[in-house]
Amino acid sequence: MAERPKRRPARSAAQTQLKQLEARLARLENQLETLHTEASGSVGAARAKLESLERRAAAQINLVQTTLKNSLDSITRTLAASKDTVESRAGRLTRAVRAGVRAGSRAYRGRTRD
C-alpha cells in the first residue's frame, strides 16, 4: 500500500510575512540589477534619471533587509523565551510526577493487611 504524503502544518502569520519579505527583497534586487545595467549604458539626462531610480531602489532594499533582520531577531527572541518557559514547566512537571510516584510508593508500602 502506498504511503500517503505527510501534511505540513499550516504556516504561521510570521512565517508568511517572512516569505513575503524575502520575495519582495528578491524582486527589488532583480530590479536594482536591471537599473544598474541600463544606467551604465545610458548617457545624459536618461543616465541621471536611471541612477536616481537605482538609489531609490537601493534604499528600499536596505529597508527590506533591515525589516527582515528585525523580524528574524524578534522570532529568535520569542523562540528562546518559549524554550525557556517549556523547559521550566517540563522540569516542574517532572518533579511533580516523581513526587507523586514516591508518595504512591510510600502509601502502598504503609498499608496494613487485614
Image (spheres, grey):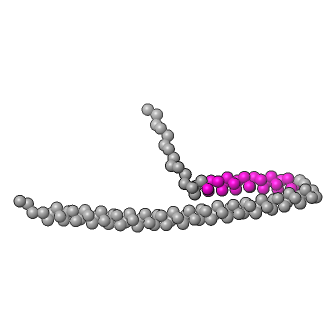
Q: Residue furthest front?
A: 13
Tally of numbered discs: 0
Quadrant of image for the N terminus: top left
Q: Measured along the vertical axis of the image, is residue 24 above or below residue 104? A: above
Q: Is residue 29 above or below residue 103?
A: above
Compared across the picture, whether 28 is left or right of 67 comes to right
From the top left corner, tell me how far across and down residue 5 is, in percent. Answer: 49, 40
Residue 29 covered by magenta stretch: yes
* Coordinates of residue 60 in the picture (x, y in percent): 74, 61
User: Which region of the structure is painted magenta?
Assistant: 17-40
In this image, 64 relative to 7: left or right? Answer: right
Q: Quadrant of the C terminus?
A: bottom left
Q: Residue at x 75, y 52 (%)?
A: 30
- The image quadrant of residue 69 is bottom right
* Residue 113 occupies quadrant: bottom left
Q: Whole-percent x and y of residue 86?
A: 43, 63
Quadrant of residue 112 in the image? bottom left
| Residue at point 64%, 61% (across, down) | 68
Q: Does the magenta-highlighted stretch encompass residue 31? A: yes
Q: Residue at x 44, y 66 (%)?
A: 85
Q: Residue furthest left?
A: 114
Residue at (46%, 34%) from the top-left corner? 2
**In the image, is 37 to the left or to the right of 106?**
right
Predominant SS of the magenta segment: helix
